[in-house]
Amino acid sequence: MKNRVYIGLGSNCGFKQENLAIARNKITELEGTRIIKSSSLYLTAPWGRTEQDDFINQVIEIETALEPLALLQDLQKIEIKMGR
């Protein structure tokens, strides 16, 4: 069964747009997963701890065969590999 999922992406370190592109590519490498749509990129100011660079944010819509917990675990692995 395919699941439709919306994921918020963001980066405020290094080459921000490149980081989002890498994250999108890694997500499409997940088993049975493809990106359906991607939003525009948005520049947003940090909140909470504001002494940091602005963020570039994006939302993607994916279709995946992964169950929610498996998807979460795989996304967390991507974050770790990317240094988050």
Image (spheres, grey):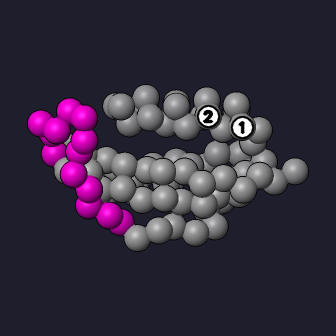
Q: Quadrant of the C terminus?
A: top left
**Residue at image x 51%, y 67%?**
38
Judged from the image, the secondary structure of the residue bearing numbered disc 2 is helix
Judged from the image, the secondary structure of the residue bearing numbered disc 1 is helix
Q: Which residues are magenta?
A: 41-53
Q: Amino acid at mark 1?
A: Pro
Residue 68 shows which numbered tag?
1
The one of 49 and 12 positioned closer to us in this rendering:
49
Residue 53 position, x and y percent, is: 16, 45
The one of 5 and 30 positioned closer to us in this rendering:
5
Residue 81 position, x and y percent, is: 43, 32
For the residues bearing labels 1 and 2, Cβ distance under 8 angstroms? yes
Residue 80 position, x and y percent, is: 43, 29
**Res. 55 in view:** yes
Judge whether 37 appears above or below 15 on screen. Answer: below
Q: Amino acid at mark 2?
A: Leu
Residue 70 is left or right of residue 47, and the answer is: right
The one of 8 and 20 positioned closer to us in this rendering:
8
Residue corresponding to mark 2: 72
**Residue at image x 47%, y 68%?**
39
Is the stretch drawn in magenta largely helix, strand or loop? Answer: loop
**Res. 14 in view:** no
**Residue at image x 34%, y 31%?**
83
